Every structure is written in C-alpha cells, then in structure tokens.
Amino acid sequence: MLHRQDRLISAVLVAGDLVCTFGALVLAYIARYVWRFAPNQPDWTPDFLEYLPFALAIMVTTVAVFAANGLYSRRPGRSTLQDFLAVIRVSLFVLLLAYGVTIVWRVSSLSRWLLAFYWVFSVLFITIFRFIVNKISARVRRLGLDKRRAMIVGSGQLAERVTERILDHPEYGYSIAGYVAEGQAQAEGSLGNQQLLGGFEELARILIENRPDEVFIALSRPHHGRLVGFVDLCEREGVNISIIPDFFEVLLGRSINRTQLEDMDGIPVVGLREVPLHSLWNRAVKRAFDLLVSLVVLTGFSWLYILIAIGVLSTSRGPAIFKQRRVGRDLKEFTLYKFRTMYVQDERQSDTVWTTKNDPRVTPFGRFLRRTSLDELPQFINVLKGEMSLVGPRPERPHFVQQFKKSVPRFQVRHQIKAGITGWAQVNGRYELTIPQKVEYDIYYIENWSFWLDIRILLLTFLRVLQRKGVY
C-alpha cells in the first residue's frame, strides 16, 4: 500500500534521528554552559559525561515516540511543512516528558534552559536532516531506482487518473507493470502507452505470471460488482491491494478490519489492510525479542535438547532431528527443524499427508513429545536464523499452500509476516479449528500485532501446553 515503509529510508531516518538528537543535546550543553546564552549562570560547569545516561534515554524515547506517530512511514503526498509540524509536535511531547522526569525525580542538574535549547536544536536538526533525505529519496525514485511494480485493474477515468499520478510523481516509487481491463479490443490504448496484460477474466493468471508488488483497483461504475472477487483473487496470491474509491457501497457488509485512507496528489486511495509489522521499528522490536528468547532457550536448555535427542535415537531408528520444507514470509521456503516424532517414512508421504489422531506413524516417545510440544524446541534455531519468529502464523508445507490458496479465501495473506512457533490460532484451538478459522485468527494477529499481544500469546501457549488440549 502507499503507506508501506521503504526499509532503507526508514533505517536511515532512525539512525539520523539518533545522531541529530545527540548532536542537539551536545550543542544545548555548549550553549548553556560554554557560550552561556542563558541568565543565572552557575559558578561551575558540570561534566558532560554526567548527561550521557540522559542522552541515551532521550535518544531512545525520541525514536520510539516518532515510530509510534508514524514518522518512519513513507507517505507519498506528505509535504515538508507537514513533516516539520509533526516533528515539532512529537519533539515537544518528548521535551515535556523529559521535563516531567526532572520534576518527579528531582533531577536538579538538568537545567530548564538546557532542555529548551535541546528542543530548538533537535527540531532544527531533525527537520533539516529529513528534508535532505526526502529530497535524495525523491531524486533516486525519479531516476527510476528503487521502484515497486504496480498493476492497474480498470480502464475508465479513475484508472486513467491513477496512471497519470504515478507517471507524474516518480517519487511515489512505482513503475506500472501494465493494466487489466474488460474487453481487450475496447480497452486497447485506453491508458496511453501502458501494456494491456489481459481481460478481467484472466486476472488470476496475470497475477501469477507478473507478481506485482501492488494492485490498484480502479473500476468504473458498470464493473463495481466485480470488486469483491478481484480482492479475493489478489489476497489469494498475497498481493497488496489499494482501492481507488467512488464505490464504497460495494464494500458494505464485507469484513475489512483495517482500512487506510491516503492521498495520491488529490486522489483518495484506500488500502485494505494495515500491517503493523511493515513498520521498521515494530520489526526491530519483535526481532530483538526473538533473538533474546531464542538465545536464552538454546543455551539455558541445551541439556534438555541433549536428553530429548537421546530419547529419540534410543526408541526408534533414524535421525534425532526431522527436517521439512515450509513456506514462510513472502512465500519463501525454508527448512523447518523438529525433533522426530514418527518412524522414518517416504518424504513424499510426510510432505503431503496430515497427522491424525492416534496416527500409527507416531512413535511412543514421539507421542509424548507431541503432547508436551517438546518436539517444537528445535524451531528456536529457525528463530535465531531469522526464518521464523516466536509468534506468528504456523508455517505450512508447500504442497498444502498450493492447495489452500485455491480453496481457502485470503490464505496467502498469512505470508505477509514471518511464521511462528506458536500463534493466535494455536492458543484459540489448534487442531480443533478448520483451516479457514485458522486463517481468520492469523489475519487478526497480522492486523492487530503488538508486543504485548505476543507476550499474551506466549503465556497462553504455556497454559495450553500444560492443559494438553487438542494435541495429537
């Protein structure tokens, strides 16, 4: 969608804001105690090293508050003035927060003049830095670099206006892969020199063959009835969707949990899904937590891994670790690790057959591992490698992904984030749920992610393991 973050620019902004914040504090210290620009100067000059803990705290707080207010999101159409006003507003909040800390904890060494100077310099530095980054970013996109491939569905006036905006504003970061329209002969040339990829009936094939990063649905009034079907097709392929609205009545009665209304140089664009984990800051927080927990588990419980491996090897023939290909974020396959719980079998069977209750393929020791979920412990290696997260939709086998994407609506949406060892679906039913129910739980998690939701799911997972419900 238009608000999806550019990862590199977000990282540059975070790093730059940290540097600007620290630089502002250094200059504020110089202005207050070296240049003595404030009245009531003290007879002594405090050592700047005393301010380092405060500097670290305010740097982290600034980045966190900026992230919470969407200042690391790339929003086409947001002006320099809007950026400046947002920086003033958020920086003022950080200043008031810092001032409140000095009052509550009675930190007398933090001068009010120092804080005032800091705020002025930080707003100035951050605004100038962001202005430079935005100009460079816009220049890079105008040169045709860092483009995301967009596809237009429609051929009327709405589709023409969207095409014009994308072509007139390279800084939006899109290149047009082509368009899809009703009736190839009538639609030929309706969007200028853009390539006609095919008719509406061919949309499923076109999505598979072209794999666009974004689909803009801009249907004329006679084709409003096709909207829901087109949305389902795009979500089946895991493609981001933005809708150019003059047909909201088509969406009435359809469950869309999070829509985002944004502006494309005067054209309202509705994104059907807000994904918190598209935010660089949110991904960084989740990744840091994943690394911390996986390192603690892999090192602190290494003895348990050894005991389980011995148990597997001594009770059945074959390796201790079972490896299987699974599908993760962005439909990329990876090798998932588990302690082997079944007798060694043909790979084609293990990759295409569901586990059932009282499955004869499961070994006695494997049944114990499955009931206690200890067979999942090696997946902390997947988490450490960055292939999985502690919490997320459970990864599925490629065979079933191809099957479910055709039969289960919105199944591919699950692959917009990393797969997890546990998930919202697992703590709400696991094997008792149907595949469509699991997908709905997974999409809820994707659209409502927060760090505290992850903590809640991990705690509920521990309780479910103790209860041993719905496990076989």
Image (cartoon, rainbow, N blue to C red):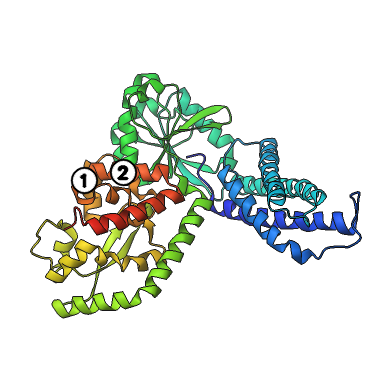
Query: Does any portion of residue 110 appear in the rendered image?
Result: yes
Question: Where is residue 456 shown, x and y percent of the image?
Answer: 38, 51
Classify mark 1: residues with Cα within 10 Å, few (<14), some (14-19) or many (20+): some
Looking at the picture, which amino acid does disc 1 mark?
A: Leu
Q: Which mark is residue 433?
A: 1
Q: Is residue 383 above or below residue 408?
A: below
Question: Where is residue 30 shown, x and y percent of the image?
Answer: 84, 58
In which image quadrant can residue 464 be found? Answer: bottom left
Look at the numbered discs 2 and 1 and tell me whether their residues touch, using CB distance below 8 Å. yes
Question: Where is residue 259 shown, x and y percent of the image?
Answer: 44, 33
Front in this rendered view, residue 224 or 117:
117
Q: Which mark is residue 335?
A: none
Classify mark 2: residues with Cα within 10 Å, few (<14), some (14-19) or many (20+): many
Callout 2 secondary element: helix
Q: Is residue 2 left or right of residue 228?
A: right
Name which residue lies at 26% across and 45% down.
438
Nearest to N terminus: mark 2 or mark 1: 1
In which image quadrant can residue 83 be found? Answer: top right
Question: Where is residue 170 shown, x and y percent of the image?
Answer: 58, 41
Query: Does any portion of residue 199 appear in the rendered image?
Result: no
Q: Which residue is tagged 2?
A: 441
Looking at the picture, which amino acid does disc 2 mark?
A: Tyr
Q: Is residue 353 above or below residue 72?
A: below
